[in-house]
Image (tube, helix red, strand yellow):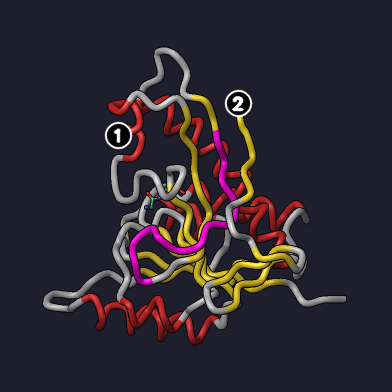
Amino acid sequence: MTARLRIAIMISGTGSNMLAIHDACRSGRLAADIVGVLTDKPQAPGLAKARDRGLHVEAIPVQAGEDRRAHGDRLLAALKILQPQVVVLAGYIRILSDEFVNALADRLLNIHPSLLPKYKGLHTHRRVLEAGDTLHGATVHYVTPDLDCGPCVLQARLKVQPGETEDTLVARIHRAEHVIYPTVLAWLAAGRLQCIGSVPMLDGQQLKAPIVQDFE
Ligand code: GAR
């Protein structure tokens, strides 16, 4: 029997993606264990939810005068003890140091609420609505030092509906994210997905473009 994938999750907010990943682990859809949940925000609502579920949690806020590199080093020290095979950013809002990202090269995933490479950065739903785009989505990608630029693995794509607001998009994108993040992790756990030198391979084939899944 193959060992279960060891996942660490980093959050800053509500943690709904973390819960979806945990649900997938509990239901058997994802052969993985969450070995720890780290946050930079001790008051993050997601942290209390993780605690309620009996997950190991650690709050590692930025200390006064601490720079990005020093904070990243403390995060890495905590991860070293947890020994995850993959680190999953799930609404982790702080920009990470290059040293942190490079130390976890090919083992660090993020989910971003847009169809990357469109709309890197913040306020993606608002920018999609302002631009009058007809399509929007979310992307699971490997993290490289350039923000929201790493190789994409899986995208959820949905049509922007008439009368759509930021709130309706948040809800619809979240629903899709809760499917695609566990899917990518299940590929990893099953040995179907690998990333070597920032090149993702799915079922032995190089992923030159993300797989796209359509959602209502
Ligand atoms: C998600 O929509 C995720 O795509 C986004 O934060 C939300 C976290 O929700 N991430 C980013 O914007 C990263 N650039 P959650 O805390 O409920 O999982």
Q: In this view, does 47 lie to the left or right of 17?
A: left
What amino acid is found at the position of numbered circle 1 in the picture?
Arg
Question: Residue shown at 34%/82% (left/top)?
Answer: 99
Point out the image quarter for the N terminus. bottom right
Point out the image quarter for the C terminus. top right
Q: Mark 1 points at which residue?
A: 127
What amino acid is found at the position of numbered circle 2 in the picture?
Glu
Disc 1: CA contacts within 10 A as few (<14), some (14-19) or many (>=20): some
Along the viewing direction, whichever of 93 and 197 lies nearer the viewer: 197
Q: Where is residue 115 in the image (x, y as percent from the top left)?
A: 46, 43
Image: 15 above or below 58: above
Residue at disc 2, CB closer than 8 Å to ligand 1: no
Question: Residue shown at 36%/22% (left/top)?
Answer: 165
- Is residue 155 found inside the magenta-colored segment of the image? yes
Q: Give the range drawn in magenta.
A: 145-157
Q: Which mark is residue 41?
A: none
Image: 101 above or below 185: below
Residue 40 picture quarter: bottom left
Residue positioned most to the top = 163
| Number of marks in the rendered image | 2
Q: Residue 216 carries which label?
A: 2
Along the viewing direction, whichever of 105 and 9 lies nearer the viewer: 105
Q: Nearer the viewer, mark 2 or mark 1?
A: 1
Q: Position of residue 27 (x, y in %)?
A: 75, 52
Along the viewing direction, whichever of 146 and 13 lies nearer the viewer: 146
Q: What element carries label 2?
A: loop
Residue 164 picture quarter: top left
The answer to whether any part of residue 32 appears in the image is no
Residue 98 picture quarter: bottom left
The answer to whether any part of residue 43 appears in the image is yes
Image: 27 above or below 212: below
Residues under numbered marks 2 and 1 in contact, where contact means CB atoms less than 8 Å apart: no
